[in-house]
């Protein structure tokens, strides 16, 4: 390894109040987009910045296990859309009878409407047989890949690009459409496109499907406590 | 559900070039911190902003399955440190003989040094038996929780707070220390504290343990291709 004497931290970049606020505003205004996509193509330089933000994510043992498959071909997207439709019909049948019509009324993907789809994969073999930090939790590579997805989501939002995560697929339907080898896991299937309008909060809350939890209920002190009794 | 007529998107917030650059700078300067923590406590308002950024993450079906357990007690942290040490000795023995001394020389956690540890958990039962978007991938709740961790990492960095993710634990050692019920999964064990110095790039690259992949190798077009042949 590198001589420790040559390897030392340096003065850390300090962020201004305005820079912090920019980050917080991007985080607050990020949405899971299903229907607001415009057909305009994404500028290649913008897309490159978004993907580079993803590639700058933390990864276990610096394994960088992710790949980004850019899907634009309408025929391929039609196949993906069919795979979604099949799984979504199964999903609808899993809900209690009284929720099924509400479920069916929700638009849960923008596969056709968004001009760009991106499948984010995780190479379960990248970094070799033993990866630092993955010895005791083999899913750390999947988690690293999700960190890349979240960086991408924020970068896209800051660029005026909406992004939606579609998770309603049978893995076995999607894999052949994308030609994935066995050691490559699908972590996220994403739809991206320019947006001019977005919901002013989580769409599932706006539509009355689910409610947001109060911040105070998710913070605990020292050890697990009954959430109802937890305080900040 | 809500009357669709009352439920529509609004004009989306537009981010300036300076705001985008702030986000990209936070992403580029984020580090996985193990040793640069200062002992100063984190201001409660700063910590609240960081945790609220986490709580603003996307979650499958708006289930918000995460909790944040704040651990400051030195005795509890000493127990966690022991659990790490036990797992890390096992980890060292998994590497090929020629890498073991290099592995042992790496500091991989800041459990004692950082004034605050946070265990981020995922409630596998939150949102009920059937969660929208989790019907075909039961791990979507874990992935949502990782999105919260990444928001937290970026928010912390913007606030001058370093964060490190410790993943070398036997789950069974850590659970009783934190009193976790069976349906609560540990997603991340994090160390946080003020930093004035950081590595100027991934520490594992600076130390010569691992190398960074070129951006061009991770982007593919339309379907999986041999990474060596892929171009942007």
Image (cartoon, coloured by chain):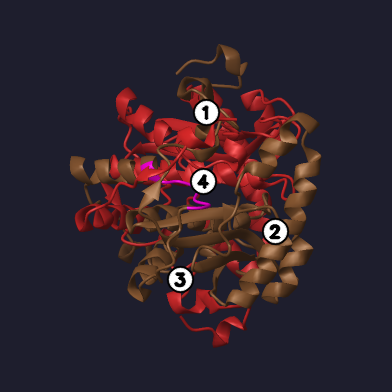
Chain colours: A brown, B red
Q: Which residue is mark 4?
A: B147
Have a look at marks 4 and 3 and say if they share a chain. yes
Secondary element under disc 2, as helix, strand or loop, is helix
Contact between labelled residues 3 and 2, with CB atoms less than 8 Å apart? no
Residue A81, quarter of the rendered image: bottom right
Question: Where's the N terminus of chain B, which quadrant?
Answer: top right
> Mark 1 or mark 3: which is in front?
1
Residue A32 is covered by the magenta coloring: yes
Is the residue A134 above or below the residue A231 in the image? below
Q: CA distance from mark 4 to mark 1?
A: 16 Å
Residue A145, quarter of the rendered image: bottom right
Is the residue A136 above or below the residue B216 in the image? above
Q: Is residue A18 left or right of residue B39?
A: left
Instruction: Give the chain of mark 4.
Output: B
Q: Which residue is mark 2?
A: A84
> Dominant secondary structure of the magenta stretch?
loop
Could you say where residue A230 lies in the image, as x and y percent from the top left? 54, 15
The label number, if any, that marks residue B212 in the structure image: 3
Instruction: Give the chain of mark 3.
Output: B
Is the residue A46 above or below the residue A8 in the image? below
Contact between labelled residues 4 and 2, with CB atoms less than 8 Å apart? no
> Mark 2 or mark 4: which is in front?
2
Question: What residue lies at 74% left-to-right and 73% top-to-bottom?
Answer: A176
Q: Considering depth in this image, is B225 or B228 the residue closer to the camera?
A: B225
Q: CA distance from mark 2 to mark 1?
A: 26 Å
> Mark 2 or mark 3: which is in front?
2
Q: Considering depth in this image, is A104 or A33 the residue closer to the camera?
A: A104
Q: Which residue is mark 1?
A: A212
Q: Earlier in the sequence, mark 4 or mark 3?
A: 4
The magenta span reads: A29-35
Q: CA distance from mark 2 to mark 3?
A: 35 Å
């Amino acid at each position: 390894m590198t001589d420790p004497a040559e390897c030392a931290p340096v003065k850390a970049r300090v962020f201004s109040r305005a820079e912090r606020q920019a980050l917080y505003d991007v985080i607050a205004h990020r949405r899971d987009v299903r229907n607001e996509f415009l057909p305009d193509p994404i500028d290649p330089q913008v897309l490159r910045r978004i993907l580079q933000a993803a590639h700058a994510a933390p990864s276990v043992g610096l394994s960088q296990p992710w790949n980004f498959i850019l899907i634009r071909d309408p025929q391929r997207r039609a196949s993906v859309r069919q795979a979604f439709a099949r799984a979504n019909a199964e999903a609808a049948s899993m809900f209690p009878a009284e929720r099924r019509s509400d479920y069916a009324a929700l638009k849960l993907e923008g596969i056709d409407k968004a001009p760009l789809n991106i499948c984010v994969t995780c190479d379960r073999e990248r970094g070799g047989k033993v990866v630092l930090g993955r010895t005791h939790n083999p899913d750390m590579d999947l988690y690293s890949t999700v960190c890349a997805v979240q960086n991408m989501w924020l970068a896209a939002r800051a660029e005026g690009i909406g992004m939606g995560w579609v998770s309603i697929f049978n893995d076995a339907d999607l894999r052949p459409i994308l030609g994935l080898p066995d050691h490559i896991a699908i972590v996220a299937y994403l739809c991206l496109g320019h947006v001019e309008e977005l919901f002013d909060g989580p769409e599932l809350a706006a539509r009355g499907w689910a409610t947001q939890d109060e911040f105070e209920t998710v913070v605990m002190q020292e050890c697990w406590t009954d959430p109802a009794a937890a305080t900040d």
